[in-house]
Amino acid sequence: MVLITALQLSVVTLMIVGAALALGPASLTAGQTTLYQGEAQRACESGAAYAFSQLRQNPIWRGDKNAVTVNTSDLFVEEDRGNVVGLVRTPSGHWSQFRFRFNFQDGAAGGDDLDDPVSLPLDFTCVSINNLQGFSPAPAPRALSVNSASPIHHSVPVWAVSLAVEGRSGSPCARLSPANPNVNVPGATRRVVEMVCQVPDMGPSVQESGSMSGGDFQINLREASGLKVRVTSKDLARTPRLRTKAKATISGGDGTQNYDSNGGEVKSKTSSLDAHYDPTQTQTGPETPADPFYQLAWNDVKKAETMGPQVAAGTYVWWEDGSLHYYDLPYDQYVSFITANPTDQGLTPAPLPDEIAADGDSKSLTLKASVYVKPTNAGNELNVIPRKGAPELPPGDPDNLTNPYMQTGPAALAANPALLYQFLTNYQSAQGGEIDFEDSGGNGPELNWTPGDPTSVNFSPDGTNYTLEDLLTVAWGGRMPAGFNWDNGGDQAPLAFDYKLAANDLGIREGSVNGQIAIDVEDGLSAADLKVSFKKTGGGQAVLTSEGNVRLTGTIDGTGGSITSGGNISITGLGANFGAGDTPAEAINLYAKGDIRFSSLDEPTPGNFQFQNVKLKGVVYCQGDFVARLGSTALTGPWGRFDLDGLLIAYGGDPSDLTVIPGANGKGKVDLRTEGAEFVFDPVYLGALSSKLPLNFRLKTLSWNNNL
Amino acid sequence: MIRTGGFSLAEVMVAAGLLAVVLLALMGLITSTLSINQKASLLGPATQVCDSLIQRTIYQVSNDSPAGTHDSFWNHSAATPWRGPLQENIGGVDYKYVLYASDAKDTGGVPLGGTAPGNRVKKLDLDLWWWDRQKSHYGRLEIQGTRLVHEASSF
């Protein structure tokens, strides 16, 4: 009996002891787990704080500094090709860890454009996506190694970043240290936070496109040309697209398909494409005025430093003997001046900074660094031309003005007051002594004179940029500048007159084709003999910046080159092979507040013309028209080809004004005449168009998920 | 001599002694278990208090509430506490805490986040301790919380 009692008592005692031993530590462990979960959560938030501080410094940051970035006694962070691991030490001395990855871990040539991490591969399936500089939503996949079949968890909107941070804490994390920040810690308490944050108030997103034009998009191929207009995308996952606020037209070719864009799309005002194309391959859709274009304001364009190397504005003229002559005159005034003084030598050798090398043998100029065009009496234009200019089109081209005196008449009149008075009194006196046109604001150039008083001729620019020569060009039968009309205060248009008779009376000689300078000197130099190269010493980008027009003649070549102009850019010559740099910061190839014009006309022997190819790379952006004349109906032979690897935007307005609809200024036309054209949309350059992210932008949380 | 039953005095004393030892051990174990349970039951709420204090601090810094909190936090660079010791009674427990705000610098000694306005990063440390109301034998209990804080982020 006693034994039985003692046995029962022992059993009960053992049960109590066992329960106490089991429950005591378990409840303590539960409390510690709660503690560690809090630490893991805060580790996640620490990782997010680190990431956001980096993103605000560099909106394209993706954890790709490939170095230990922080290494203090209580904080350690390492970045390895998109993967980031950090350690945070608590005051009690133990580490907690955060980890996140932008790397798809899909090899060197994968979809993330990152090599695989070397030291910090992460066994963590949530991938972070930086789409702050994006122009379309980006998928956020879930996989250890992302491929095309990987599941997409969510879509990251534009101007947003999706950040998935894993935090780990607990006693197993004692194995972590700055020397081993990413070792396995089985049993650690783990939390995951995924947040999507966006820069607020950025307006509507832009539908990406390789070409955007505020006006017509028109390409005229040579009749019988076997080549096409091809539009593709370097990133096969992105749609090769053309967008125009007006019409899209491809004409010419050999009668077969002249537009080829497999999987592509054309968006136009009429939802149509006027071309020979395969509608099963290329879709069409509507483009409305409200659909935004990439907006790149002049102030946001990377330019040469105004206080850096400078070259004086004016006209630089190569002579056949290899000498370079400088005239402190804008192009139009130079033409007038040299027409009247054909043997004037100007200033020679031309004053050039050390950063521009001139070689008289090859008639070449080489920019070895970024150069700013310093304003002078000539204004802020930069012109580089051969002595007798360079024709932009061959004789007989319908684009040449029909009035054969157009090239010489206005300039001759503007440069000679006596001749101007004679012209006005003999041929324009019926106007009551006034030629006047104005814009919608009532401003416009005005010419007044008093018959009988040769000293009375008076020109008023009225706050516009139009010169006396511009006004006289209209008087000689030219076109009214865009946006202007005759002053509606009276009948003040110039009289129509017999320009041949007038030219004969005034002693004005017949003009040449566009770009040619008709001077009576012997000089056989043509555009084909000249060259302008962009080769920055030590690599990087060489930027040529002018607040005014830039007119370059000759072959243009170089990689990492950029021309930014506050006026028009005109490139005439043998052709171009001109590319921007490979990074978003160096992506601008050409930027003009006005028009960009190319003519690749070559005149290898006098009177024999042919066109050369133009190949551009990077972002080509103008606020006016983009016109490339790589062919002429006056020439039957093969024309030149046009190739663009990047983006072309002819905005047709000032993109800094968010209220301006593209094409509102009547411009924004893309107009090519070519043997064939290839547009390769390269999204790598989109980053250059994202400079509109405000400085010190803030991120607004769109979503926040805990413990995925 | 015939034994009629019962235990000798020696047997009873040995048995009583053994029983006393067992009971004492059992009581000690139960006391210890109760103590651990008590500690665990306090750790959970304290962890929540720790979280709440950190979140509240970040909110006050982010929203400059009360006025001056933002600048006080971001301009604090000494190793001394930024705030504290402070005391809060939550759930009947008197919690005391100290807040530290230390600069986070990169390997070049440059403040993390650079010099851009609103982009600073600091390490916020909270040291939280409390005593059990019964002043149990384990005495003062203490936990810590730490995290990075980004000036332009409100989380």
Image: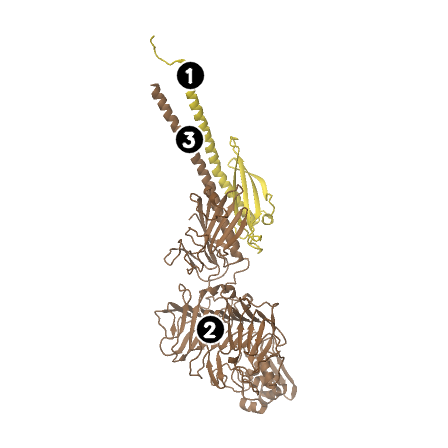
Q: Is residue A2 above or below residue B127?
A: above
For label 3, the residue is: A20
- 3D distance between C-alphas at marks 1 and 3: 29 Å
Residue A554 horizontal/vertical position (percent): 52, 78
Residue found 57% across the figure and 46% down from its top: B101
Q: To which quarter of the image does residue A324 belong?
A: bottom right
Give me the disc on residue B13.
Answer: 1
For label 2, the residue is: A615
Residue found 43% across the figure and 33% down from its top: A24
Q: Secondary structure at mark 1?
A: helix
- 3D distance between C-alphas at marks 3 and 2: 82 Å
Label 2 resides on the chain identified as A
Label 3 resides on the chain identified as A
Are marks 3 and 2 in one subunit?
yes
Are marks 1 and 3 in one subunit?
no
Residue found 57% across the figure and 40% down from its top: B86
Q: Secondary structure at mark 3?
A: helix
According to the rendering, which colour does chain B have? Answer: yellow
B86 relative to A120 in the view: left or right: right
Q: Secondary structure at mark 2?
A: strand
A643 relative to A535 in the view: left or right: left
Callout 3: 10 Å neighbours few (<14), some, many (20+)? many
In depth, the one of A96 and A451 nearer the eye is: A96
Residue A616 horizontal/vertical position (percent): 47, 72
Callout 2: 10 Å neighbours few (<14), some, many (20+)? some
Quadrant, the N terminus of chain B: top left
Tags 1 and 3 touching, CB below 8 Å: no
In the rendered image, what is the letter of the chain coloured brown?
A
What residue type is disc 1 on?
Met
